[in-house]
């Protein structure tokens, strides 16, 4: 790791040495050389997790034709909903900026009866939930 005024490495762990609370986002540069002498340089962005929690609830689950995704947001956030089928194909994606908690209702009539994987991204945080679509409509 390159010299940084607020961080240092100790026993393989990154340690904050700055004053007060760490910033919400910090960039550090890392350099690694393998046994063959090849060097890789990367910039890493460190994000501070806050104590406020985001929460997501999916209901009903299993579902027939309508699926609700309720979001409890800790702060104003960019929210992305992605749904993947059992083969890993993305079947739905939507991104929006939200100011407060909200519920997104999805019509899933056209989905096959199967297990789906819902990935919710709230800013830099990811939440993974299963969704089971019933065979009845």
Image (cartoon, rainbow, N blue to C red):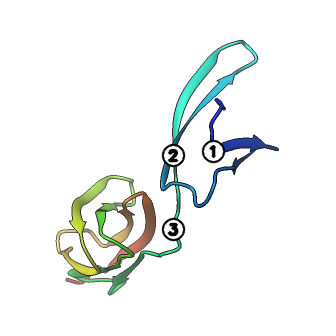
Residue at left 25%, top 81%? 103
Which quarter of the figure has residue 100? Answer: bottom left
Query: Within 10 Å of the Cα at label 3, are there few (<14), some (14-19), or many (20+) other Cα atoms?
Result: few
| Rendering coords of residue 94 (x, y %) | 22, 61
* Label placed on residue 6: 1
Element at label 1: loop
Q: Number of callouts in the render?
A: 3
Query: Within 10 Å of the Cα at label 2, are there few (<14), some (14-19), or many (20+) other Cα atoms?
Result: few
| Rendering coords of residue 24 (x, y %) | 48, 56
Which quarter of the figure has residue 71? Answer: bottom left
Pick the residue in front: 32 or 7: 7
| Rendering coords of residue 77 (x, y %) | 31, 65
The residue where tag 3 is placed is: 50
Residue at the extreme bottom = 60
| Rendering coords of residue 46 (x, y %) | 53, 48
- What separation in Å lies between label 3 and label 2 (alpha carbons)? 14 Å
- What separation in Å lies between label 3 and label 1 (alpha carbons)? 19 Å
Which is more N-terminal, label 2 or label 3?
A: 2
Give above or below for 26 relative to 136. above
Pick the residue in front: 41 or 130: 41
Residue at the extreme top = 37
Residue at left 70%, top 12%? 37
Give above or below for 55 relative to 8. below
Badge nearest the viewer, 1 or 2: 1
Quadrant placement of the C terminus: bottom left
* Label placed on residue 26: 2
Whether pointer 1 and pointer 2 mark residues with C-beta atoms closer than 8 Å, the reply is: yes
Residue at left 69%, top 49%? 17
């Amino acid at each position: 790791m390159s010299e940084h005024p607020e961080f240092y490495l100790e026993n393989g762990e990154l340690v904050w040495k700055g004053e007060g609370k760490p910033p919400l986002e910090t960039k550090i540069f890392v350099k690694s050389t393998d046994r063959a002498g090849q060097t890789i340089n990367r910039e890493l962005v460190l994000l501070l997790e806050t104590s406020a929690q985001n929460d997501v609830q999916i209901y009903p689950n299993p579902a027939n034709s309508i699926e609700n995704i309720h979001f409890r947001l800790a702060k104003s956030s960019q929210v992305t909903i992605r749904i993947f089928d059992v083969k890993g194909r993305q079947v739905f994606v939507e991104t929006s900026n939200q100011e407060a908690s909200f519920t997104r209702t999805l019509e899933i009539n056209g989905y096959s009866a199967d297990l789906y994987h819902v990935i919710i991204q709230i800013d830099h945080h990811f939440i993974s939930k299963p969704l089971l679509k019933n065979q009845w409509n």
